[in-house]
Amino acid sequence: MAKDSSFDVVSQVDKQEMANAVNQVQKEVAQRFDFRGSSASLTLEENCLKLAAEDEYKLDAILTMLRIRLAKRGVPLRCLEPGKIEPAAKGTVRQQVNIRQGIDKEKAKSIINTVKGLKLKVTAQIQDDQVRVSGAKKDDLQAVIKKLKESDFGIDLQFINLR
């Protein structure tokens, strides 16, 4: 009997690349002429970014710089989930940007339905915040990967642990 092959469908963000992009934006904010004397800041926490500035224009400029740096570093922009802009002390504004990681249950179910719709001899199951697809033929698994790459689930997907 042939051994089953499998792979995992995940949605992850490279934390090191994220930290590097944040550091680049922090340096650019410190050097740019329009941010001189400003208290604009960008900090990276575990699963979120905190932005603060004098007005919404500068806040938007920081977010745009961050998106440019992340795109250059190959970090998917779909992982950013900006919150609403809130007023802060001394007439400043702040914004929290959540970093989405993992596949939630609804998206995992839609991925499994897409895999089942292919009518291939593969099985898909939810494991925490990822989906494992297994089957006897590697060609079937490659067809599943191709179909999932063509589909849009609203998140960036990576395929790891192909065995």
Image (cartoon, grey):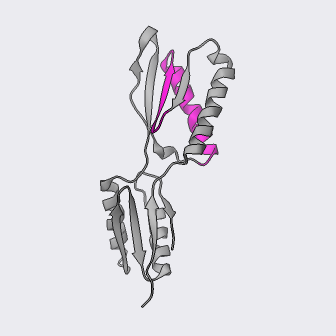
> Which residue is at the front of the view, 89 or 154?
89
Q: Is residue 87 inside the magenta stretch? A: no
Tell me what residue is drawn at x 62 percent, y 39 percent: 20
Which residue is outermost to the bottom?
1
- Residue 32: where, in percent of width, then height? 67, 21
Which residue is outermost to the top?
90
Left or right: 140 as drawn, with respect to 75: left
- Residue 57: where, in percent of width, then height? 52, 21
Tell me what residue is drawn at x 56 percent, y 47 percent: 75
> Which residue is at the front of the view, 133 or 1?
1
As drawn, 12 above or below 95: below
- Residue 30: where, in percent of width, then height? 65, 21
Tell me what residue is drawn at x 45 percent, y 58 percent: 10
Q: Is residue 62 inside the magenta stretch? A: yes
Tell me what residue is drawn at x 34 percent, y 59 percent: 108
| Magenta stretch in the rendered image | 45-74
> Which residue is at the front of the view, 91 or 49?
49
Image quarter hosting the N terminus: bottom left
Left or right: 20 as drawn, with respect to 129: right
As drawn, 8 above or below 82: below
Left or right: 130 as drawn, with respect to 36: left
Q: State how many labels appear.
A: 0
As drawn, 110 above or below 102: below
As drawn, 54 above or below 69: above
- Residue 153: where, in percent of width, then height? 40, 55
